Image: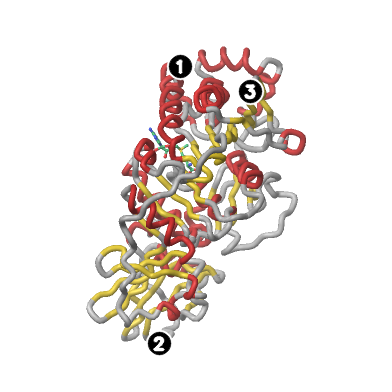
């Protein structure tokens, strides 16, 4: 592999004797890994487990993921193993398993947001933000597949979050970076690399962190991560948070167990995965804690619209429906979120614009109640909803939005299941199946 000169020159100095074995590892095939959705698919840990992630597994080779219906059912997420290391930071911060208010600031396409949802207490609220508008749909799509209700999606510049002063217990900043850790997996990252680009990334990261820190509550935690080896984008950013914002760096117990490098200086601890030591790509993570202080109260001046028509009986659609507050999100579109989160959601609504709250589960069209794709994929749906189990070929036909060629099950809305996992709805009428998979979710390969 021919690395950019400036990169190789710096890495030789930075990595010292480690560079030759790192370079060798970068010539080898990148491992393939996935992370299961524990509320949809349970797998016992085994010799292929990712050691730092309960639901993470390595695969022997890369399958054609698009042709696996379980991916579309949200039973797993394809994710690079090193980036699953945030699990250890969350375990440390959230060991009490108390509900938390969490912001995933740089969230698209949703790898870490789906991971956070699996790790956090289900009374936690996750705000998944993506600043680039064109990347928001893929984030929403992946969150919909994951099927959790306790999230909000926003499309905001980080500085807008200052309006929610001291609100979040945890903020994950998985920052846009120079991508050096992805050179083996993604040659595009190498072609786009330049020293100038890397320094621009560092400036942008500092700006993002300065912008977002006011919304962290006193005593709260920032998890900062990148997929680069560049110290100016990694340890230096932690150092700046310590110097300018009186934050304390947290030492984690990762080194002995997982082969992660601990980069420590001046009381700042950063954790670097390098492919010759950990089975995954290059990844950096650090955890910083804000000093304690007064906790702020937030006013509410916008409420959820919870006056819903009597015709909507949520117990027909949702399991443990008493736990949820139902609200009209857009005209005739009804969503749900845990009752215990209503107050926090209303604080958020009162301060910043949001794209999506909870799970949109039904739409009213005249007298008809139409269930949504989000309901089919939700982990909160009623187990009593009618389903039809289909074999692989029919599951793929369904996901291509074609007709189904199976025995007619009788009229009505049915959830199409593959290996017990929901793929979406069909509305069966007069001997025909109307495939209700939303266009944007269909697969386009032959
Ligand atoms: N956390 C994501 C995941 O696990 O799937 C990956 C995030 S990616 C490393 C960085 C994200 O930061 C991108 O989605 C990018 O659009 C976003 N981004 C780019 N510029 C940004 C900025 N100025 N402020 C905040 N986010 C930004």
Which residue is situated farthest in the front direction here? 294
Which image quarter: residue 324? Answer: bottom left
**Residue 8 position within the rendered picture, expressed as x and y whole percent measured from the top left:** 56, 16
Pick whichever of labels 3 and 2 is earlier in the sequence. Answer: 3
Q: Residues within 10 Å of mark 1 (few under 14, many from 20)?
A: few
Compared with 421, 274 (above or below) is above
Residue hosting label 1: 195
* Disc assigned to residue 217: none
Residue hosting label 3: 23
Q: Is residue 1 visible?
A: no
Mark 1 close to ligand 1, CB under 8 Å: no
**Residue 210 position within the rendered picture, expressed as x and y whole percent measured from the top left:** 43, 29
Left or right position of 58 against 407: right
Q: Nearer the viewer, residue 331 or 299?
A: 299
Pick whichever of labels 2 and 1 is earlier in the sequence. Answer: 1
* Disc 3 to disc 2: CB gap under 8 Å: no
Pick whichever of labels 3 and 1 is earlier in the sequence. Answer: 3
Q: Residues within 10 Å of mark 3 (few under 14, many from 20)?
A: some
Residue hosting label 2: 410
Q: How many marks?
A: 3
Rendered-image quarter of ligand 1 = top left
- Identified at 40% across, 49% down, the residue is 298
Q: Secondary structure at mark 3?
A: helix
**Residue 397 position within the rendered picture, expressed as x and y whole percent measured from the top left:** 42, 66
- Identified at 69% across, 49% down, the residue is 49
Marks 2 and 1 sit apart, C-alpha to C-alpha, by 64 Å
């Amino acid at each position: 592999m021919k690395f950019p000169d400036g990169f190789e020159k710096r890495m030789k100095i930075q990595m010292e004797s480690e560079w030759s074995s790192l370079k060798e590892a970068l010539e080898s095939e990148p491992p393939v890994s996935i992370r299961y959705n524990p509320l949809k698919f349970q797998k016992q840990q085994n010799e292929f487990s990712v050691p730092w992630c309960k639901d993470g597994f390595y695969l022997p080779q890369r399958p054609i993921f698009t042709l696996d219906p379980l991916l579309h059912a949200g039973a797993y997420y394809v994710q690079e193993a090193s980036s699953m290391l945030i699990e250890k930071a969350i375990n440390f911060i959230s060991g009490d398993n108390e509900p938390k208010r969490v912001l995933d600031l740089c969230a698209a396409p949703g790898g870490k947001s789906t991971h956070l949802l699996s790790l956090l207490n289900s009374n936690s609220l996750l705000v998944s933000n993506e600043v680039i508008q064109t990347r928001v749909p893929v984030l929403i799509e992946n969150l919909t597949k994951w099927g959790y209700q306790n999230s909000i999606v926003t499309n905001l510049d980080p500085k807008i979050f200052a309006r929610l002063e001291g609100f979040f217990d945890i903020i994950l900043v998985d920052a846009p970076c120079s991508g050096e850790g992805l050179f083996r997996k993604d040659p595009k990252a190498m072609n786009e690399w330049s020293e100038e680009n890397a320094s621009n990334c560092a400036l942008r990261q500092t700006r993002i962190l300065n912008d977002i820190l006011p919304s962290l509550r006193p005593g709260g935690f920032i998890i900062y991560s990148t997929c680069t080896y560049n110290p100016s984008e990694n340890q230096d950013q932690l150092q700046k948070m310590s110097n300018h914002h009186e934050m304390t760096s947290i030492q984690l117990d990762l080194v002995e167990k997982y082969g992660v490098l601990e980069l420590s200086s001046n009381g700042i601890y950063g954790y670097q995965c390098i492919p010759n030591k950990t089975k995954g790509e290059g990844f950096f993570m650090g955890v910083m804690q804000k000093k304690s202080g007064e906790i702020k109260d937030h006013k509410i001046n916008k409420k959820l619209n919870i006056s819903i028509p009597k015709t909507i009986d949520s117990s027909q659609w949702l399991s443990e429906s008493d736990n949820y507050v139902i609200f009209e999100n857009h005209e005739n579109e009804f969503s749900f979120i845990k009752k215990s989160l209503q107050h926090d959601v209303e604080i958020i609504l009162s301060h910043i614009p949001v794209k999506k709250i909870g799970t949109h589960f039904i739409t009213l069209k005249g007298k008809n109640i139409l269930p949504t794709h989000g309901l089919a994929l939700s982990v909160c749906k009623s187990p009593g909803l009618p389903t039809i189990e289909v074999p692989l070929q029919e599951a793929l036909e369904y996901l291509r939005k074609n007709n189904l060629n199976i025995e007619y099950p009788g009229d009505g809305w049915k959830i199409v299941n593959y290996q017990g996992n929901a793929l979406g709805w069909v509305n069966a009428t007069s001997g025909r199946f109307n495939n209700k998979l939303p266009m944007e979710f269909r697969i386009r390969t032959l």
